[in-house]
Image: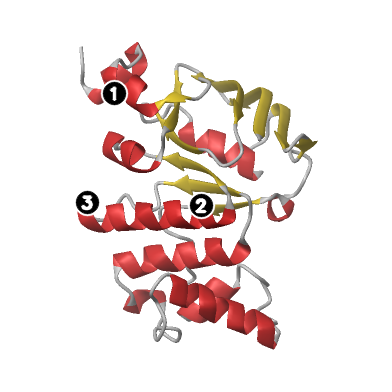
Amino acid sequence: MLELDHLDIRLGDFRLQADLTIEKGARVAVMGPSGGGKSTLIGAIAGFVEHAGEIRWQGARIDRLAPAARPLSILFQDNNLLPHLSLFDNVALGIDPHLRLSADQRRAVMQSLERVELAGLEQRRPAQLSGGQIGRAGLARVLLRARPLILLDEPFAALGPALKDTMLDLVADIAAEQRATVLMITHDPADARHLCPYSVIVADGSAAPPAETESLLADPPPALAAYLGRR
């Protein structure tokens, strides 16, 4: 499981606290008003934001590890594709940042591209890919890394509803295959419903423990209700 034990983040006048547990294999949406600290929370888990308190995975502290050494993959809204590299090389970065791959590793990259239906596009640059293909490329790298914790910071926000649902289904499939835990930041309740049975609300300086997504949306707490435009 993922444990945030008295996590305390202070950035200037901004403060965010979290004291919660997420079960292994859970798919959890992270929702709340803009500027509430959703990306800050994910950034702390990934190792990009300093904090007090402890972050543990399966009982072992990971907050002392460098970001690359943590048992996770993170996918941002821009999917982190480097414009000067081919699709193959962008995905292969998930194995070796120096792109020195063995024959077995090259086969693994090809298999991940086939899994997300990008076979045949290996030599294209990101500028030659559609939004959906870029999203799939990011997921190919997540698949290749096979880390037990997947962090998603609105990677599909720019996609249309049908294509977004396809991407979310692919995330669900990958998570099931790898028995991975998923935390997904989203501004869209429909996305939370589609992928995540549980949600964490980040608002008013704190991240609440996970609760059932349907229950939260049916009877939202004040901060979420205001964000959703409900009275």
Residue 210 visible in the current orientation: yes
Left or right of residue 12: residue 124: left
Label 3 – label 2 distance at C-alpha: 22 Å
Residue in the picture at 30% in, 23% down: 217
Q: Amino acid at mark 1?
A: Tyr
Secondary structure category for the residue under label 1? helix
* In front of the other: 38 or 138: 138
Q: x%, y% of residue 57?
A: 71, 38
Vertical order, 121 against 183 (above or below): below
Indicate which disc, 1 or 2, sits on the residue closer to the N terminus: 2
* In front of the other: 15 or 1: 1
The image quadrant of residue 60 is top right
Tag 3 near tag 2, CB within 8 Å: no
Vertical order, 114 against 48 (above or below): below
- Disc nearest the viewer among 3 and 2: 2
Determine which residue is flagged by label 3.
161
Q: Which mark is residue 30?
A: none
Label 1 CA crowd tier, 10 Å (few <14, some 14–19, many 20+): some
Residue in the picture at 79% in, 40% down: 64
Label 2 CA crowd tier, 10 Å (few <14, some 14–19, many 20+): some
Left or right of residue 197: residue 22: right
* In front of the other: 165 or 73: 165
Q: x%, y% of residue 16?
A: 56, 23
Q: Which mark is residue 176?
A: 2
